[in-house]
Image: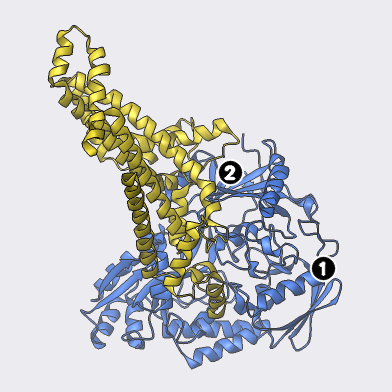
Amino acid sequence: MKLKNLLWATTLVIVPGLAAADTVLRIGLQQEPTSLDPTSDATASIDGMLTHNVFESLTTADESGAIHPRLAKSWTISEDGTTYIFELEQGVLFHDGTSFDAEDVVFSFNRAMAEESVNPSKSIFKPIDSVNAIASHKVEIKLSAPNAFFLFNISRGDASIVGVESVEENKTNPVGTGPFTFASWTRGDRLVLAKNAQHRDADNIQLDGVEFRFIADAAAATAALMAEEIDIFPGFPAPELMDQFEADPRFSTSVGSTQGEVVLALNNSKEPFSNLEVRKAITHSINRGDIIDGAMYGRAVPISSFYPPHGESHVDLSHVMPFDLAKATALFEDTGLAGSELSLRVPPFPYATRSGEIIQAQLAQAGVTVNLETVEWGFWIDEVFKQKNYDMTIIAHTSPNDLGNFARGPDYYYGYDSAEFNEIFAALSTETNVAMRHDLTVEAQTFLAENAPAVFLFQLPRLSVFRSGVEGFWQSASVLYQPLAGVTMKDASQ
Amino acid sequence: MSRSLKKLLGLLLTLLSISLVVFIIMNVIPGDPAITILGIESTPEARAVLRDKLGLNDPAWQRYVNWLLGAFHGDFGVSYSFGVPVSELVAERLPLTLTLALVATVLTIVGALALGAIAAMNHGNWIDRLLSMTSQIGVAVPVFWLAMILVIVFAVQLRWVPPGGFPGWSHPVAGAKALILPACSLALVQTAILARVTRAAILEVARLDYVRTARSMGLNRRQIMLYHILPNAMVPIVTVAGLQFASLITGTIVIENVFYLPGLGRLMIQSIGNRDLITVQALVVLFAVMVVLTNFVVDVFYAWIDPRMKEGRT
C-alpha cells in the first residue's frame, strides 16, 4: 500500500511535468520486462531503459566499448593488478534524496556477491575478494587474480549502484543516481522517465523526458512508426521492411553491430558431433552469404569464430573452413553420415527460424536431412539449454566478452570440453597486458574456428528506424545499455 | 433452492477442474521461470536461490494445494516474474479487456440485428445477396489481418485514430479513440456471423402462422418485424451472441497484441512465455469465470424472452 501511494505521488508530481511543449523522446521497444531491477533480472530491456539512465555504475562504456569514469571519478590499479582504488563523485544524490557514498558501493557489491544473491551475472563478481570503504568517497576492491574484464564488467547494469534505503522497491520503483528519474510504468503499455535536474551533467541534457512504448508485434511497430506515434525503434524486428523506411524521407535508418554472435550450436556431448570431421562437414556445408541474404535481407556481417567483427582483436578466419560443398559431401560420406537425419530445434526468433530453413536446405545439398522444429522460448530454455536434448540449434549469444562460453565445460549446453581451450581462456581472462591479451584473443578465436564446436554464422545486427532529427542514439550496441543523456531531437511537429 | 445449489456446485467443480488442468499442463510443459528471469548466462547457484525464493522447490501437489487455499480466500499469490500480487496485475488490466469485449458485443448485436433484418426483409433480391456475400467474407477473414488493414487505412493513412496503445482513462477522449479500431476489428467478424444467424432466425419465424395473421390484420412490415418477428427470433440469436461474447474475451488476446493494449490478453501471453504459472492459472480461471457467467446471463435471458423455457426446465 505504501508503495502504491509512493508511485501515485511520483506520477502526480512528475507526469504533468512532461507537458506537450517538453522535448519527450518516444522509443518503441519489443520486449517489456516484468521487473525494473537490473541486479535481479536479466531481461535485456531493463538495461536498455534504465542502466546509466536511472541507475549508474562505477564505470561506463561508450558505443565502441571503451571504458570511462561514471560514479567513480578515477581509479588506480596496483602493480600486481589485483587492488583497485576508486575515487567516487562527491555530492551525488539518489533520486529519493539520500546521498551517495562509499557505503552504497560496498553495499551494492556485497549484495551481488552474497550467497543468497540472485544477480543474473553473478559470475562477473566471482573474481572479487573484498570490497571496502577506505574513506567516505573512496573504495578499495581486491581481486583474487588480475582480471582483464573487470573494469568493463562493473559498468554493466548487473553492477548498478543501488541505495540501501530504496533497494527493496527497485523492482517496481527504481531509484538510482542517474540523469533520469523513474516517473511511471503502466505495465503492458509504457514506461516514462523524466530528466533529473539535480544530476551533475543536467546542463548537457536536452531531453525533458523519455517514453518507452512496448510494441512486441513487428507489424504494429511499423504502423506506430508510420503514424509517427514513436520517434525511434532501436532493434527493429523486421529487416524485410528496412527498404521501405530507407526510401521514406521522414525517417533515417541505421544498421549497427551488437555483441550477439549467431551460431548454429552443436551438441558436442554426443555422437556424431563429438567427431571433429562431422563438425567440419557441417561447417563446410554452410554458405553464410546466402543465410544473411535470406534471413537478414543482406544486413549482417558473417563471422567465422566467436568474436564480434567490430572488436579490436578480431581476426578474419573465413579461410579456415569456408563454404565448400564438394568437401562437405565427401566428409559426410567418409563419416558415414550421408543420407542420415539430424534434428534442428530453433527458438521462435525470426533470425533463427529463417536461418534454420536455409541451413536445412544447405545441409540437404550436402546429403544430410534436417528435421527443422521451431519451439517456444520456454521450451527451448528447458529442453535445449538445460537438458541438452537436441542435435543442433540456432541462437545469438549477446553477452560481451563471451569467448569463455566454450570453456564452461561439458555441463554447458554445447557439451564442449577442451583442456586446450580452457587453458587459453584461463590465460586470457587473467591477462591485463593489452598486447598479450590481444594475442591470446586471436589464439582463442583461431582455436574455435579450427575446431568448430559450433558453426559461427553472423553477427546479429542492430537495425534502427528513427524519425529524422533524432541524434545521438547509438547505432551499435557494444553493451546492453543505451545512455540517453546525449540524445537530442528536433521538434516533432515540423 | 436445491437446483441453484446444484448449479453453484457444478460451477465450482468446473472451475476447480479447470485450475487443476492448467496447473498440470503448466507443470508438464518444459520451462523454468528461474532461467527465464535470470537469463541463460546466469550461474546455476543464482538460479537455485531464486527457485527457492519463489517456492518452486516444494512438491507440485503442495504448491497446488497452497494456491487453492489462497484462492478461496481471494489471495491469488504473488507473480513469479512481476513480483507483485496477481490480483493487482489483474485489477490493472481487467477494465480495459472488459470494456473492449463489451463495446464489441454491443456493436456486434446492434449491427447484426440491423443487417440480419434488412437481409431477411429483402429475402432473395440483390440486397440480400450482397449482404450474404459480404458476411461470407467477414466470416472467413482472420481478425488480426482485418485489424492490420484497419490500422493502415484509419491510423497510418487517414490519421483519424492512433495505431495502438492506450493513454488511460485520465484522457477520456483519447482513451475512447484508442479503442475504436480494436473494438471494430473484434466486432466486424462477429457481426458477420451473427447477422447470418439473425437472418436465418427471422426467415424461420416469418413463415409462422401468427405472422401471417398479423399481416392480414393490416400491420405494416416494420411493425411486424419489431413486434412479432424479432422477439420470437431472439432465442437462437441470444444463444450465439452468448457464445460470441466468450470468444470476444479470448479474441482480445490477439487484438491486444496487434494494438499493443495493456489488457489481460497481453498479460496472459507474457506470463505463459515467462512460465509465470501462478499468473497464468489465475488468468485462465478468470477467463473461465467470465465464460460461465456469460452462460448464466444467457440462461436468465432465455427465461425472460420466452417464458415457456422457464416452465420446460422445472
Residue A264 visible, this orientation: no
Q: Which chain is yellow?
A: B
How far across and down, in percent of the image, does residue B300 sit? 33, 35
Give the label on residue A468, or none: 2
Chain containing mark 1: A
Mark 2 nearby-residue class (10 Å; few <14, some 14–19, many ≥20)? some
Q: Which chain is blue?
A: A
How far across and down, in percent of the image, does residue B34 sit? 51, 71
How far across and down, in percent of the image, does residue B270 sit? 46, 57
Give the label on residue B48, or none: none
Chain containing mark 2: A
Extreme residue in the bottom direction:
A419
Of the residues shown, which amino acid type is indicated by label 1?
Asp
Image-based side of A362 in relation to A127, left or right = left
Q: Earlier in the sequence, mark 2 or mark 1?
A: 1
Q: Is disc 2 placed on a helix, strand or loop?
A: loop
Give the quadrant of residue A327.
bottom left
Q: Nearer the viewer, residue A73 or A381?
A: A381
Q: Distance of mark 2 from mark 1, alpha carbons?
A: 41 Å
Give the quadrant of residue A285.
bottom left
Image-based side of A173 in relation to A100, left or right = left
Give the label on residue A101, or none: 1
Residue shown at 29%/80% (left/top)?
A: A328
Residue shown at 26%/29% (left/top)?
A: B307
Image-based side of A308 in relation to A454, left or right = right
